[in-house]
Image: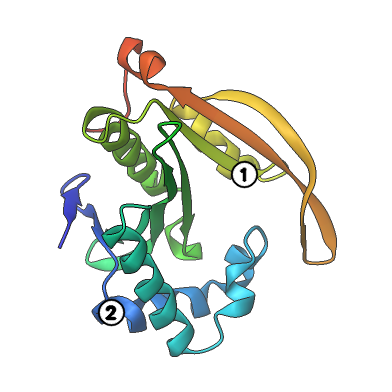
Amino acid sequence: MFKADIDNETYIAILEPRHAAELFNLIEGSRDSIGKWLSFPDSTNEMKDTENFIEKSLKRFASNNGYWAGIWHQGKIAGSVGYLYFDWNNNKTEIGYWLGENFEGLGLATKSCNLLVKHAFDDLEINKVEINVASINIKSKAIPERLGFSEEGTIRDYEYLNGQYLDRTIYGLLKEEWMNKSWKVGNS
């Protein structure tokens, strides 16, 4: 299906059923680090859960309403990045991402998000891309900030996770802002 190179060692590709075991094992091995910020590890208890997730993602892809891609680095799945939805009436989307614990700090999420931002603006003709992160997740907040997104606000007590309410910081980037940037990350 769809595959896009980020650099010599890294690419993203649409998640397919054949990736379920590899993806499940990555989640299983990074359950604590991923679960600190995201709820899906709690509902990913067996391979069938990952298979169902991939199936739902492929249906969203087929209906032109978003999708998830795997991030591969040095031949191993490192995480996932995707469009959570496409709002074609308002010409916007939101990007989500996560990495396995052993792949953090390599710039993979930033480069992957950059590729999806570029695709959204250049190919899909989207007008606005959003990224929403837990307000206390400093590493995750750095990604939209590096990519030139503007902080648009905070939703208080957005999500109850691990026994606490987490605020959510909303970042946005408009196509016009992207086109006027004098620099872009990676292969832009």
Residue bearing the label numbered 2: 17
Where is residue 136? Give x, y as percent.
73, 43
Res. 16 in view: yes
Which of 74/49 is in front? 49
Q: Which mark is residue 175?
A: none
Where is residue 65? Give x, y as percent.
37, 52
Answer few, some or many: residues within 10 Å of disc 2's Cα (few below 14, many 20 plus, some between 14 and 19).
some
On screen, 137 above or below 101?
above
The residue located at (36%, 61%) in the rendering is: 60
Which of 36/166 is in front? 166
Q: Is residue 172 left or right of residue 124?
A: right
The residue located at (34%, 31%) in the rendering is: 126
Amino acid at pointer 2: Pro
Instruction: Name which quarter of the figure residue 88 lies in.
Output: top left
Quarter of the image with the N terminus in it: bottom left
Where is residue 91? Give x, y as percent.
40, 32
On screen, 38 above or below 48?
above
Answer few, some or many: residues within 10 Å of disc 1's Cα (few below 14, many 20 plus, some between 14 and 19).
many
- As helix, strand or loop, the secondary structure at mark 2 comes to helix
Q: Is residue 83 left or right of residue 46?
A: left
Quarter of the image with the C terminus in it: top left
Residue bearing the label numbered 1: 133
The residue located at (24%, 61%) in the rendering is: 74
Res. 70 in view: no
The residue located at (44%, 88%) in the rendering is: 47
Q: Nearer the viewer, mark 1 or mark 2?
A: 2
On screen, 28 above or below 177?
below
Where is residue 22? Give x, y as percent.
34, 79
Q: State the CA–CA distance, disc 1 to disc 2.
A: 28 Å
Amino acid at pointer 1: Val
On screen, 188 above or below 53?
above
